[in-house]
Amino acid sequence: MVKLTKIYTRGGDGGETSLGDGERRPKDDLRVAAYGTVDEANAAVGIARLHVGGEESAMLARIQDDLFDLGADLCVPEEGPKGEASGVLALRITATQVKRLEDEIDALNARLAPLESFVLPAGSAAAAHLHLARAIARRAERLMVRLARSETVNPEALKYINRLSDHLFVLARHANRDGTDDVLWRRGANR
């Protein structure tokens, strides 16, 4: 359990922050940007939860927990003093979490109307917010892929963020009455 007794520390006033292993990095460091964008995606998922109920809200609640796990995974480098090389087991995204997303995607997608065009990020309020969360998750993925070119990133974390955007897409379509209220792209319609 995390216990915070003081919210500000003044430690970041000079433009640096601490990773989960204590290493200091600039606040615009690629690793910090990646887990910061994961946090942004989590906030967008939280807004989307305001517009859904039942099992959809439960799915998003699990995703929010997973996104905190993903942030924890990213903020402790595998090569750092608290990473895998140190023998300390940091919190990492697992194949089980990826598989759960895949199973939920398959179940949701089975109910959807077939796609006949690209879907615009619109429709119901729930769908629009889910599409926004999806776009932010894609940005987090791009940052994580870029980070993986220079530092080790948990492969399951990369799979998770990739599946997450797919999950949010099918959930957005589900929120649009299983795709029947999707707003479709009309290619070249305004020429």
Image: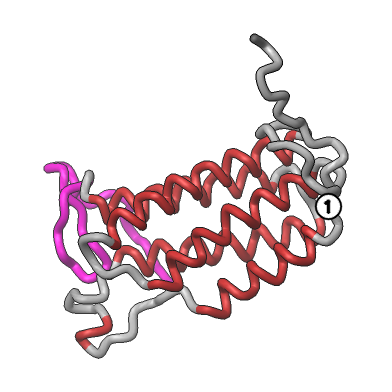
User: Compared with residue 2, is residue 48 higher up or lower down, i.e. above or below?
Assistant: above
Describe residue 132's horizontal placement relative to residue 24 as left or right. Answer: right
Residue lying at the far top of the rendered structure: 191
Q: Nearer the viewer, residue 79 or 50?
A: 79
- The picture quadrant where one finds residue 51 is top right
- The picture quadrant where one finds residue 156 is bottom left
Write down the residue under mark 1: 112
Q: Is residue 12 magenta?
A: yes
Q: Position of residue 29 (x, y in %)?
A: 21, 50
User: Compared with residue 182, is residue 75 higher up or lower down, i.e. above or below?
Assistant: below
Amino acid type, callout 1: Leu
Q: How many marks?
A: 1
Q: Nearer the viewer, residue 138 or 77?
A: 138
The residues colored magenta run 1-27
Predominant SS of the magenta segment: loop
User: Compared with residue 176, is residue 97 higher up or lower down, i.e. above or below?
Assistant: below
Describe residue 45's horizontal placement relative to residue 86 as left or right. Answer: right
